[in-house]
Image (cartoon, grey):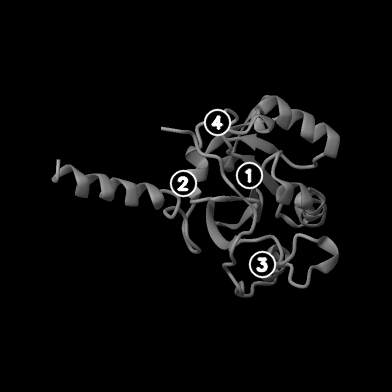
Amino acid sequence: MKKLIPLFLSLLLLASFKNEAGYKVGSAVANFKLKNIDGKMLSLGDHKDAKGIILVFTCNHCPVSKKYENRLIALDKKYKSLGYPVLAINSNDPKREPQDTYENMQKRMKEKKFTFPYLYDETQETARAFGASRTPQVYILQNTGGTFIVKYIGAIDDNGDEKSVKEKYAENAVNALISGKPVSPDFTKSIGCTIKWKKA
């Protein structure tokens, strides 16, 4: 029994860090394919002609995510024509959060008139690959010779209240990439709801 205690503690510690792994700034992103709200499968590779991607982990139920929906639409409207479209992903387990079912994603899209794909990460493998932990959490990717490289990770801006925003982190990152300048800061802390992981 005594031998099992250290093993149990090690596994518990490992579990507590399960979302700490994942892509970092400078990482190359592996291709993924997820179901869009229109029923079609969409992959990162389908965006080979884009200069980059504004990839956001979000969801239906989170109050913080809801506050950013209009800002995501505005980001897509502003940067899609410049080669940086928005790509949204919901990775929440609908058994833990019923508002985040695929059907409710479709309803939310119609209500808000999303101009960007809203993908369902049913297995949560994409969220784990990225190391995503919250909603909303943004990853700015740059297409470098057909490989998407992470250039920024974190918050979309510095305030949930849109009228009080002083630093537009995601916009600043994309503007820097378009101008050929380094992204600074390239990492900020995401503030929002935790991703609802499937229970083992």
Q: Residues within 10 Å of mark 2 (few under 14, many from 20)?
A: some
Q: Which residue is mark 1?
A: 47
Q: Earlier in the sequence, mark 3 or mark 1?
A: 1
Disc 2 marks a residue whose amino acid type is Ala
Choose top left, top right, bottom left or bottom right for residue 155: bottom right
Q: CA distance from mark 4 to mark 2?
A: 13 Å
Residues at marks 3 and 1 touching, judged by CB atoms closer than 8 Å: no
Q: Which residue is mark 4?
A: 122
In this rendering, is residue 81 above or below 128?
below
Residue 38 visible, this angle: no
Q: CA distance from mark 1 to mark 2?
A: 19 Å
- Of circles 4 and 3, the one toward us is 4
Q: CA distance from mark 3 to mark 1?
A: 19 Å
Q: Earlier in the sequence, mark 4 or mark 1?
A: 1
Q: CA distance from mark 4 to mark 3?
A: 29 Å
Residue at point 61%, 46% (across, down): 48
Q: Secondary structure at mark 2?
A: helix
The percent coordinates of residue 85 (x first, y second) are 72, 50
- Of circles 4 and 1, the one toward us is 4
- Residue 173's tag is 3
Q: The N terminus lies in which quarter of the figure?
A: top left
**Depth check, front residue: 16 or 43:** 16
Residue at point 56%, 44% (across, down): 195
- Residue 190's tag is none
Left or right for 32, reference 168: left
Q: CA distance from mark 4 to mark 1?
A: 21 Å
Q: Which residue is mark 2?
A: 129
Left or right for 27, reference 113: left
Disc 4 marks a residue whose amino acid type is Glu
**Depth check, front residue: 185 or 99:** 99
